[in-house]
Amino acid sequence: NVPTQQWAQVIEKTGGPLQYKQIPVQQPGPDEVLVNIKYSGVCHTDLHAVNGDWPLPTKLPLVGGHEGAGVVVAKGDLVNDIEIGDHAGVKWINGSCLACDFCQRSDEPLCAKALLSGYTVDGSFQQYCIAKAAHVARLHKDIPLDAVSPVLCAGITVYKGLKESGAKPGQTVAIVGAGGGLGSLAQQYARAMGLRTIAIDSGDEKKKMCLEQLGSQAFVDFATSKNLVKDVQEATEDGLGPHAVILVAVNEKPFQQAAEYVRPRGTVVCIGLPAGAYLRAPVFESVIKMITIKGSYVGNRADTSEALDFYRRGLIKCPFKTVGLSELPHVYELMEKGQIAGRYVVDTSR
Ligand code: 8ID
Ligand code: ZN
Ligand code: ZN
């Protein structure tokens, strides 16, 4: 009962336009599953892929999307640990070699042969998507597929980033880009991990969401603050600055500011990937404050299971809006303007 044709959002060339059209359903290879995607979150990475922002080319034509939640409808002969009918998630790391030095040490995102959903292989903005069985996220059937979809990239990534920050329960983390998809989940994961959060973003809608829904203790508006460094430091209990900074903004400036307000001994974790951006930090202050600056890239399979378990326990509530897959271009327009509070999720049935 798997159809031969399906609806998808396709780009033929970098820069678009998106075409909502019917394309063939592919058959899974021996180590792959075919997932009937019900919902997919829309990550800013998908927009970077359309725009060709990064020094890594995409496949073309391309079906984007890497926060796909659905049901396994077919599997290859070598797949014996996931069954037809099981719920599964297609995440950014679609597959990896499982044999290289990085894969052996469970740093699968660092695998040189990693396949990237919606980037180097077709992703979840279609009704039937292929992924390597070893990497597909296992979703318990009691988890709603729409609400969980943003966890499959945004959730895993910020959970991993928070772990990489080394912040301990009771300490304070600044979330830069707090009103977006990764930022809103970062506040929820941080809270579940016993951390205090300071939200940095812009506008009343995002402010209200961060303070009233997501549990941040302070909100600093980057567009209206006269002295952002001072405002962020003053938002911490003792005025010395946050123990860690999670950078999920799509803008170079905050990447060049964080080292100034992070607490001595603090850690700046870079996650957002603004086009052509560079990191910058004052050498003098970085040295005498003993600051750590690092990158963090999605998560491995264990991070995936852990992030999903936090969700399943009811600890993570991410604000999201659902629209049809056919409306994806509109979601990108809003995203481009920074007008999305939380995440958009697309329903592949319409
Ligand atoms: O593994 C990774 N490292 C990874 C995984 C997933 C996503 C990295 N990403 C990257 C995406 O490619 C993107 O570059 O993280 C970034 C954020 O993705 P997103 O959360 O999906 O984007 P969004 O929903 O558009 O949110 C971005 C927020 O940043 C705010 C915007 O207002 C928006 O709410 N922002 C901007 I633009 N400039 C800001 C500034 N100067 C800012 N917030 C604070 N200060
Ligand atoms: Zn993503
Ligand atoms: Zn590998």
Image (cartoon, grey):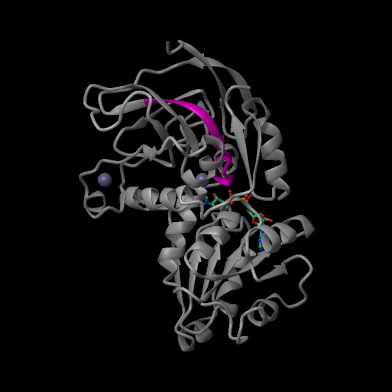
The stretch drawn in magenta includes residue 40: yes
From the viewer's perspective, is residue 239 above or below residue 115?
below
Q: Residue at x 51, y 42 (%)?
A: 148
Q: Is residue 298 visible?
A: no
- Relative placement, left or right, of 97 versus 50 is left
Where residue 262 appears, as percent x and y from the top left, is 55, 78
Where residue 126 appears, as percent x and y from the top left, is 52, 25
Q: Which image quadrant is residue 90 in?
A: top left
Where residue 141 appears, as percent x and y from the top left, is 43, 35
Q: Which image quadrant is residue 296 in?
A: bottom left
Where residue 290 appears, as percent x and y from the top left, is 44, 84
Among all residues in the image, which is located at the extreme bottom?
288
Q: Which image quadrant is residue 205 in?
A: bottom right
Q: Residue at x 23, y 21 (%)?
A: 77
Q: Residue at x 56, y 25 (%)?
A: 12
Along the line of sight, the residue nearer the viewer: 67 or 312: 312
From the viewer's perspective, is residue 214 above or below residue 194?
above
What span is colored magenta in the figure?
34-46
The stretch drawn in magenta includes residue 9: no
Quadrant in the picture for the N terminus? top left
Along the line of sight, the residue nearer the viewer: 193 or 150: 193
From the viewer's perspective, is residue 2 above or below residue 137?
above
From the viewer's perspective, is residue 283 above or below residue 270?
below
Q: Overall secondary structure of the magenta stretch? A: strand
Along the line of sight, the residue nearer the viewer: 125 or 290: 125
Quadrant in the picture for the C terminus? top right
